[in-house]
Image (cartoon, helix red, strand yellow):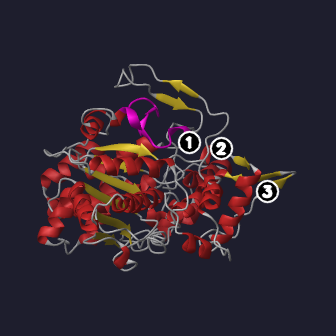
Amino acid sequence: MAFDLEAISALLCIGKLPSAKALQELFDALNPELPKDLKSTEVPAPPSPIPDATVLHFNYDEGHSARFTVPQTQGGSVDFEYVMDRPTPLKFLITTLSIPAPEPAPNMENTIFMPGLNTLHEPKPGETTTEQRLEYYVRVLRSPTMAQLHPGTSLDQGDVRLSAKRAVALRLAVSALSAVVPDTFEPKIDGDDVIWSARQLDFIQTGLSSFNLIDTPLKQRLRDLLKRSCAPDGESVVLVGYSRSSVDIRSAVQDYIRQQKADGVEEDVVQRTLRDRVTVVTVGSATAGYPDGPAYVHLAAFEDPLASASGVTSKHNANRAGKDAVFLNFTSPFARGAFDSHNFGALSSQYLSVAMAANGATGLRDLWEKVQQNGKKVPPNEDELLRAMIVCTDGTQWLWSPEEAWKGVSVDALPDPDRAEAVLREGFGDAFVDALIRDFGKPAVPKFGPRSVSVSADGDGGGGGVDGGDQKEEEERRCWPFCNIS
């Protein structure tokens, strides 16, 4: 990585320009660190579908950072280089280590999904994993088959004690990022130790990565992917970055272009190659400033708190979204629902499915190309189709804050099951709906989160009542949504 010293000095409010070496030492201290007591166990074959590879479980999620998910192994992952050493690595990845689509497209795209913060790779009591969520997204989207590259999170590490150098660097970073870091992000002091919560560390590292000030393992692997895909014999790739992962994708593209230009490649050649080989899809983008080159698709509700503040929509930072970017923006039915307008499982995946069906697309690159060729086709009842999809795919089960989300929905916002089915049949035909029913069952009255919420006639959550729940259950339910944000 190359640092822009003047820009960094201004960001950190440093009067004197530091040396590149001093900056490198500072930011190296902020890069994610593996826990000192990290342990791994090998997954036997079977269930591993790749018996010649070392598939591992880890006692901490950071162990899976920048590794590929191995399906059907209860959260096992394989080293990035194992896949890249195959003769055609992306074809191998999609045919061997992907979540298969219910209706795979004839020309299967090499699609790699990267989740956001705060969702773990391995099963934990009461929480869904990144693999379980990806399985659901693939079922909603129908045709794209996806593999997963896990970013890693500190979420399961509790409080983290920092070395003196990391503690000083982190305090400086928090001061520099005061515009985006909450005031409550203050460490605990225990003697000579400085203690931060793992969630705070994740958040701050995301902010630093958005300024390209630290080099995360995911960003390093993304640069490798770009280099390999843009090589003369490279394979095309579709990179889907949800929330925080969009930050590392953007920064990796910036780094790749900068390195290519330093190697003497003309900028227009770099951009043309990226346009031909690389598609970037952001879901609830957490940053802006996407460099020209890749084919971009930006998916987000207008009410998405991240995309509308620091990311991109057609109404916000549209001129910083990359050349010829396709915007898939919509009105959230859960606009007042805390963070749920940022929720891929509850509504954004459903909108993407509607957009693909309306434009006759069977993949995400295919969607971008069809919009470039024919313009974006938007059904006149797009809003109603979205709500019908939420009902027919049981999207409300993924809401993080069910009662708050429901308060933002008017009485008629989500159709009853029969109406939802009828709307989709009229919009996209019997075959489309019959396929959904085969996978999700007949549409039913929406459920909210892990338990049903009784809904009163005025659209409120019936005072937040949970069917058959005592006080303890209510407290557990209230904590549940915050375990799996992004």
CA–CA distance in space, label 3 to label 2:
15 Å
Disc 1 marks which amino acid?
Answer: Glu
Residue at 41% x, 73% y: name it. Answer: 410
Quick check: is 81 in the magenta stretch? yes
Residue position marked by numbered label 1 in the rendering: 62
Examine the rendered structure and indicate whether residue 457 appears above or below residue 71. below
Q: Which residue is mark 3?
A: 188
Quarter of the figure with residue 241: bottom left
Q: Residues within 10 Å of mark 2 (few under 14, many from 20)?
A: some
Q: Position of residue 473 (x, y in %)?
A: 63, 48
Name which of mark 1 and mark 2 comes first in the sequence: 1
Task: Give the residue at mark 2.
Answer: 157
Residue 341 appearing in the image: yes
- Left/right placement of residue 194 relative to residue 254 reads right
Do callouts 1 and 2 mark residues in contact (Cβ within 8 Å)? Answer: yes
What segment is highlighted magenta in the picture? 63-82
Q: Secondary structure at mark 3?
A: strand
Q: Residue at x 46, y 31 (%)?
A: 74
Observer-nearest of 462 and 410: 410
The disc labelled 3 sits on which kind of residue? Answer: Lys
Of helix, strand and loop, which one carries label 1?
A: helix
